[in-house]
Image (cartoon, helix red, strand yellow):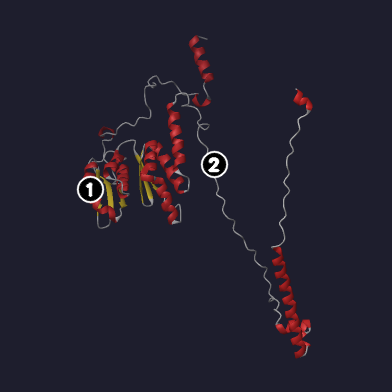
């Protein structure tokens, strides 16, 4: 066997099974960026589309005035191959493909543009969605919590004092975030949008955004370090524990067992007199019996009062103070 054949056989044995039949590509060098998104030009697609695609979205009434003023700029931005219509009677925006359209993804970008305009995103920011590498995500937060007061508080927590929390999220994720009503509109790279969605939903579910901000800051510092770039970051990331606030336990009243029989009747005065034998006494004897009862009660009350008066004259128990005796120095210690 020659040296070339030996080398080829040794390389074949070292390769894993998944790459057994994969050959080397001399034109595929390390300088080539496989993730680079190249711009889509007219030369890439010279033919027109056979079918017309269209998307429509409704917008609230308070956006009518702004959209009416900004619509000429929208038509100018989409003049390359998308036709757009603003219907003020129905309150809708529509985008359609035309004969001039050559980019198949342009209609999706136009759909995202009108969605963002409907959710109070300014036109100067919404136009950036037409660029490559920028996507949008409209997060619905209205259906997560039923209580309106708690929802408003948690939504305000996401914005923060003077919008400081929202600015921090935008800086770390490299995304534009807009909180409006029951939705949160986000624009930026795909990786950043994923983080924004996680922060927003967790905030509405009562997890403060500051925890995610701390985590993102640590991740950004670790990404800049070349030694730790390809290692696991779990040991550096903070692990927050949930703290359950103790609440007063509800006292569960035990239900009484059901019985078909009614409760026992409360004895009347006559029944009590019959039991004690007072009922059969003469009227004179009854008067004497009542007088004796009164005298007994008076005696009991007089004894109670007497004991209360005597309490003031009883001296309190004095605690004996233990005095510490000083240890007498021995003669040997004094001599030494």
Name which residue lies at 70% across and 63% down: 311
N-terminal-most mark, 2 or 1 = 1
- Residue density around tag 2, few if under 14, some if 14–19, many if 20 or more, within 10 Å: few
Badge 2 marks a residue whose secondary structure is loop
Q: Would residue 270 be seen by someone viewing this image from the given angle?
A: yes
Badge 1 marks a residue whose secondary structure is helix
- Residue density around tag 1, few if under 14, some if 14–19, many if 20 or more, within 10 Å: some
Q: Nearer the viewer, residue 177 or 330?
A: 330
Q: Nearer the viewer, residue 84 or 208?
A: 208
Label 2, on which residue? 241
Name which residue lies at 42% across and 45% down: 200
Tell me the quadrant of the picture where the C terminus can be found: top right
The percent coordinates of residue 1 (x first, y second) are: 52, 10
Name which residue lies at 72% across and 67% down: 307
Of circles 2 and 1, the one toward us is: 2
Label 1, on which residue? 71
The percent coordinates of residue 260 (x first, y second) are: 68, 74
Q: Would residue 140 be seen by someone viewing this image from the given angle?
A: no
Name the side, left or right, on which 144 lies relative to 316.
left
């Amino acid at each position: 066997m020659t040296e070339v054949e030996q080398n080829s056989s040794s390389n074949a044995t070292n390769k894993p099974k998944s790459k057994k039949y994969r050959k080397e590509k001399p034109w595929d060098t390390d300088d080539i960026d496989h993730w680079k998104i190249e711009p889509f030009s007219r030369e890439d697609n010279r033919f027109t589309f056979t079918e017309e695609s269209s998307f429509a979205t409704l917008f609230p009434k308070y956006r009518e005035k702004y959209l009416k003023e900004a619509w000429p700029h929208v038509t100018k931005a989409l003049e390359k191959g998308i036709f757009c219509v603003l219907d003020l009677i129905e309150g809708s925006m529509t985008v359609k493909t035309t004969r001039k359209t050559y980019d198949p993804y342009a209609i999706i970008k136009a759909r995202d543009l009108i969605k963002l305009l409907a959710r109070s995103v300014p036109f100067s920011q919404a136009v950036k969605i037409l660029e490559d590498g920028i996507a949008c995500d409209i997060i619905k937060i209205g259906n997560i919590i039923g209580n309106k007061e708690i929802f408003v508080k948690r939504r305000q927590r996401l914005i923060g004092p003077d919008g400081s929390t929202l600015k921090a999220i935008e800086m770390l994720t490299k995304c534009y975030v807009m909180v409006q009503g029951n939705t949160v509109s986000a624009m930026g790279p795909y990786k950043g949008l994923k983080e924004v969605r996680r922060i927003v939903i967790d905030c509405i579910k009562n997890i403060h955004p500051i925890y995610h901000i701390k985590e993102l800051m640590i991740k950004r510092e670790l990404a800049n370090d070349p030694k730790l770039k390809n290692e696991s970051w779990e040991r550096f990331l903070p692990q927050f524990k949930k703290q359950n606030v103790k609440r007063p336990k509800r006292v569960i009243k035990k239900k009484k067992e059901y019985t078909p029989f009614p409760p026992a009747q409360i004895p009347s005065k006559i029944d009590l007199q019959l039991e004690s034998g007072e009922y059969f006494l003469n009227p004179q004897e009854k008067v004497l019996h009542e007088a004796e009862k009164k005298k007994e009660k008076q005696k009991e009350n007089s004894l109670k009062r007497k004991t209360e008066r005597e309490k003031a004259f009883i001296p309190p128990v004095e605690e004996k103070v233990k005095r510490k005796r000083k240890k007498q120095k021995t003669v040997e210690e004094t001599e030494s």
